[in-house]
Image (tube, helix red, strand yellow):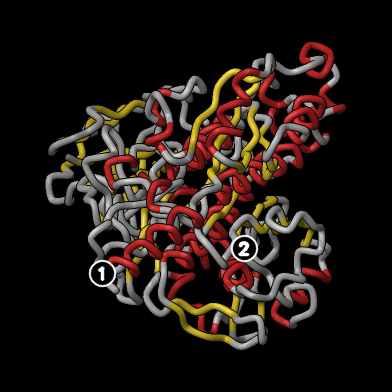
């Protein structure tokens, strides 16, 4: 009986995985030069403007995949085309191993990369596609349930200055968005025309709200865009949002990585500023497709390489770190392992690490994961039934931070995506002592804004300060025609730690009592001002 059972199990497993998944890479694209010369034929005007603003070149990767090649593939025996990518000049196919391997005989096929790494002659990391080593009205919200998670990252200070994400466009990649188009928590979003269209890449339909088997995307969106008077305020209630379903909640298969990359390309073409994805990929139903923790190096997973291209294209990508901290897997999953994205870990309402939050590891060589953290323990979100609920997961710390950054970026629109990421990290609570649990710590987005605004309208000319970083004595020089200067130093919480007037003949400032970290220093004198940052070692 045992032998019969074993035989039946083997037959079942074999038949279950008879169909393989693979990425097929093409040799070229048609009409590349003509398309780049006429970019409006392949990109929206908003996308073109965003690239110009950030000095990002329009290149061959912006040109669509050859539809003629795709049509030819569909005619091949046993081949189903599931997704396509212009960035990788590739398609995701499914079929028998022998049928997929036969595609290499086609003149326009450059390479084939099986999701089952054992079927490749080379490892995933040897793929030929390489990634390069990218007086205002005051708003006083009553936050209600979300007060803690909004104030923890100082997004409320941005809101007070009327920076609520307006003008920033976010693409949300997730698994389902039921009732977003009807429920009251998103009425403000719809009324302001900020709920843009979307697409379901899994079922290939524009009816993005029809998939009701998962409410995950609805909850994720609420952390950014939800608004219930005096009860719930997301971190970017006035940003604009595209909704893309890329996750098939019924199974785990690497085609979901391909859906995600395809959606990211769509987002790029639409001129999206940011992507939030509260998804992560580590292991699959077919264990032959699964990654190992050592693969979480930003260069192995297809989705991580795609996220790096999205960042290179000028999109700020925010990703949940994952919920594997208390499991054998433990480390941050893909695409959060990419060095080019902000991966967000989790803390509780008191700012203490929550054990489920995925951790950084030795696989992430030369860069820090997670990047920063926000509330993930019992975070407040809104369900598809328009009810405020509490859920655990870095799925929610990610949009909390993403929305906060959207509000920050509205305040400093001249900043590049790289600058935004860097200042968010620098504003965090343990920037000088990062670890695998909290990364750089809890960001202070109001401090990040102040770090940007280093030069005010009437700067003091010929001002210098040194050394920076400083250990004990900070020397400050300014023009001789200014007799005295008031110096105000703020810590990362925005608190005044030194307030002193210095004269031109006594311009050394003792900062030895300050803890190590980043500080803002404001100098005021003769109706002139300047704000700079320095590091105390």
306 or 349, which is in the foreground?
306
Q: Secondary structure at mark 2?
A: loop
Mark 1 and mark 2 lie on one chain; the one further toward the N terminus is 2
Q: Which residue position is annotated with label 1?
A: 355
Q: Residues within 10 Å of mark 2 (few under 14, many from 20)?
A: many
Residue at the image position 81 percent from the left and 25 percent from the top: 68
- Mark 1–mark 2 Cα distance, whole angstroms, equals 27 Å
In the image, residue 442 above or below residue 113:
below
Judge from the rendering whether residue 63 lies leftward or rightward of residue 260; answer left or right. Answer: right
Query: Residue 199: image x %, image y %?
Result: 76, 55
Residue at the image position 65 percent from the left and 81 percent from the top: 384
333 or 232, which is in the foreground?
333
Residue at the image position 48 percent from the left and 52 percent from the top: 319
Q: Residues within 10 Å of mark 1 (few under 14, many from 20)?
A: some
Which quadrant of the rendered structure holds the C terminus? Answer: top left
Quarter where residue 355 is shown: bottom left
Which quadrant of the rendered structure holds the N terminus? Answer: bottom left
Q: Which residue position is annotated with label 2?
A: 236
Report how many numbered discs are placed on residues in the image.
2
Query: Residue 22: image x %, image y %?
Result: 55, 37
**Label for residue 516?**
none
143 or 339, which is in the foreground?
339
């Amino acid at each position: 009986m045992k032998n019969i059972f074993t035989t039946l199990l083997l037959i079942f497993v074999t038949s279950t995985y008879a169909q393989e998944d693979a990425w097929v890479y093409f040799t070229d694209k048609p009409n590349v030069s003509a398309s780049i010369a006429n970019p409006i034929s392949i990109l929206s005007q908003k996308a073109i403007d965003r690239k110009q603003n950030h000095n990002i070149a329009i290149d061959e990767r912006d040109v669509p995949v050859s539809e003629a090649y795709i049509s030819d593939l569909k005619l091949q025996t046993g081949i189903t085309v599931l997704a396509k990518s212009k960035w990788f000049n590739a398609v995701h196919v499914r079929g028998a191993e022998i049928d997929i391997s036969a595609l290499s005989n086609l003149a326009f096929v450059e390479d084939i990369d099986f999701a089952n790494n054992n079927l490749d002659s080379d490892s995933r990391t040897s793929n030929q596609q390489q990634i390069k080593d990218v007086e205002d009205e005051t708003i006083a919200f009553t936050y209600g349930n979300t007060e803690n998670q909004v104030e923890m990252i100082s997004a409320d200070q941005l809101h007070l200055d009327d920076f609520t994400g307006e003008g920033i466009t976010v693409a949300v990649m997730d698994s389902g968005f039921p009732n977003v188009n009807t429920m009251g928590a998103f009425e403000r979003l719809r009324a302001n025309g900020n709920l843009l269209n979307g697409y379901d890449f899994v079922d290939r339909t524009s009816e993005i709200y029809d998939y009701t088997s998962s409410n995950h995307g609805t909850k994720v969106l609420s952390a950014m865009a939800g608004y219930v008077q005096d009860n719930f305020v997301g971190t970017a209630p006035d940003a604009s949002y595209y909704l893309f379903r890329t996750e098939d909640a019924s199974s785990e298969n690497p085609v979901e990585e391909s859906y995600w990359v395809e959606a990211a390309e769509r987002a790029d073409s639409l001129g999206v500023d940011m992507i939030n994805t509260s998804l992560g990929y580590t292991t699959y139903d077919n264990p032959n497709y699964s990654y190992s923790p050592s693969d979480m190096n930003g260069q192995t997973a297809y989705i991580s390489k795609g996220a790096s291209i999205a960042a290179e294209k000028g999109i700020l990508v925010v990703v949940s770190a994952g919920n594997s901290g208390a499991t054998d897997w433990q480390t941050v999953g893909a695409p959060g392992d990419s060095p080019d994205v902000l991966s967000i870990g989790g803390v509780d309402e008191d700012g203490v690490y929550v054990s489920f939050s995925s951790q950084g590891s030795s696989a992430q060589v030369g860069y820090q994961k997670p990047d920063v953290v926000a509330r993930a323990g019992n975070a407040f979100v809104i369900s598809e039934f328009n009810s405020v609920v509490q859920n655990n997961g870095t799925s929610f710390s990610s949009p909390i931070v993403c929305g906060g950054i959207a509000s920050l970026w509205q305040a400093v629109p001249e900043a590049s995506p790289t600058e935004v990421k860097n200042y968010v990290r620098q504003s965090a609570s343990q920037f000088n002592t990062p670890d695998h649990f909290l990364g750089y710590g809890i960001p202070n987005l109001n401090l990040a804004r102040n770090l940007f605004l280093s030069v005010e309208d009437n700067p003091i000319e010929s001002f210098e300060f040194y050394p920076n970083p400083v250990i004990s004595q900070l020397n400050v020089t300014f023009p001789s025609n200014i007799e005295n200067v008031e110096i105000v130093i703020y810590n990362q919480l925005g608190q005044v730690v030194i307030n002193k007037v210095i004269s031109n003949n006594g311009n050394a400032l003792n900062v030895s009592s300050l803890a190590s970290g980043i500080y803002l220093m404001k100098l005021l004198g003769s109706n002139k001002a300047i704000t700079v940052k320095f590091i105390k070692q």
